[in-house]
Amino acid sequence: MGWAEYFVRRGHAVYLPDQSSRARSGFDATTINQVRLGKKPPEKLPAIFTFGREAAWDLFRFGPQYPEPFADQQFPIEALGEFGNQVIPDLNATLPTPNPTYANLADLARSAGGAVLVGHSESGFFPEQAALADSSNVLGVVSIEGQCPPPTDAQLASLAKIPTLIVFGDHLGDSKISGPLWTKALADCKAFVRRLKAAGGTALLAELPKFGFKGNTHMLMQDRNNLEVADWMLDWIRDNALRRTAKRAVGKNRSGD
Amino acid sequence: MGWAEYFVRRGHAVYLPDQSSRARSGFDATTINQVRLGKKPPEKLPAIFTFGREAAWDLFRFGPQYPEPFADQQFPIEALGEFGNQVIPDLNATLPTPNPTYANLADLARSAGGAVLVGHSESGFFPEQAALADSSNVLGVVSIEGQCPPPTDAQLASLAKIPTLIVFGDHLGDSKISGPLWTKALADCKAFVRRLKAAGGTALLAELPKFGFKGNTHMLMQDRNNLEVADWMLDWIRDNALRRTAKRAVGKNRSGD
């Protein structure tokens, strides 16, 4: 069972939006059609990112190098073909700046009447970006296996008001090509969490092995122990982000609002 | 409420797959990247179909021409902006022949243990195409506002075994540019249904105005009376397609299978 269904079964309303330019959110095909018609040169085409199984194996830390798995890794390798079917081309190069997904996520939180935003990988820091666009309905942010670009001091002061959970799996430095990328992401996120705490924020940088979860890959929501990780994460969300909602609801009742 | 949710509330399991090359099913970006890198000429780029509100207004029969609505039309014009947000580029030009969606739909029917397949517009005849690929788990087909390319006699004999509902909305000949397109689609589908019936099939060509539903557009599942149309359609499915399943289930019980 995937997390979207499992979160619902645990009693949470779940929205699974596709980021701008991706899947059901569509993308702007204008430039591609203009190049086809000779109205723009080929070098104006967006660079469309995608990957095959060998690159995924290293980048997502199924093992040190394709096709060798880590002895304790949790991804169901027998499902690698089905996993490949889920890969869709990345058209972010067609997007304007800032990425419209940030404000759209904040809007979704508003229309839901408050939400905990969860991002993964490329979208790992989107919850924080959404909160920087409009934090008023962001009850908490969870960034899984993403990057943590350093915010300005003013941005940090705003983010420190939002309970923040940063999650990484196992073997961060152990894949042959991508090891340094993950080691840097971890270091940057550790620095981000230190700054949040120094500003009085509720923040946790969780390396899953230190919480008893061994062998988790980049795709930890699809790993064999995905529901155990989900339970642990939902507990953190309940204790650190949703209690804040409960307090707000009490306050609302008292004021008769 | 949309049909996917409403069908569930009426007690049916619902799967809403994205066709190959579209949305969460992804597409093959190889050619676009090759042209960008100078390895193929620009004219090899796929023609990506999309449309704006003026073209949609005519093609989807919100009125005779933009921005004039039919007096009795049912589409919530005030939501035209949100409707536009749902438009995603059509990358079918990147697909091989035959369209992989046909066999994938048949596979979905199999993995669901039997299904009624419903298609709309471009995918209107996909249910029939899926049944031609593998009819063994197709309990019925519903083609809404699509085209009916004439099957061969052998294909027709196969399709005549499957309960078939073809649905069209109102004002088929009344939009200024697209009128002839819809008039031809209706005529082709009438001929198709006549052939199914002549071969002993259960088939209905339903022009909604003749069933009491006036003013429905091409987007009839989003029209104001969408749930009334859904109820009527589900009744037809229950009476003509699902009773066949019930009989099969009884047969199964009798044989102890």
Image (tube, coloured by chain):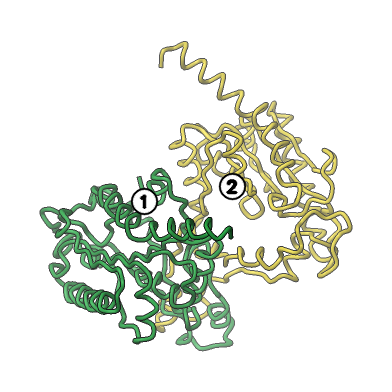
Chain colours: A yellow, B green
Judge by depth and name the residue closer to the eye, B123 or B109: B109
Q: Amino acid at mark 1?
A: Trp
List x then y, in percent, for residue A172. 82, 53
Q: Which mark lies nearer to you, 1 or 2?
A: 1
Residue extending farthest to the top is A254
List x then y, in percent, for residue A175. 83, 61
Find disc 1 in the rendering and name its residue: B3
List x then y, in percent, for residue B10. 38, 45
Is residue B235 in view from this perspective? yes
Judge by depth and name the residue closer to the eye, A227 or A248: A227
- Residue in the picture at 49% in, 41% down: A106
* Left/right of residue A121 with respect to residue B9 in the rendered view: right
- For residue A109, above or below residue A93: above
- Residue in the picture at 53% in, 48% down: A16
Q: Amino acid at mark 2?
A: Phe
Corner quadrant of residue B63: bottom left
Corner quadrant of residue B140: bottom left
* Left/right of residue B256 with respect to residue A202 in the rendered view: left
Circle 2: element type: helix
Find disc 2 in the rendering and name its residue: A126
List x then y, in percent, for residue A62. 79, 60
* Left/right of residue A188 with respect to residue B18 in the rendered view: right
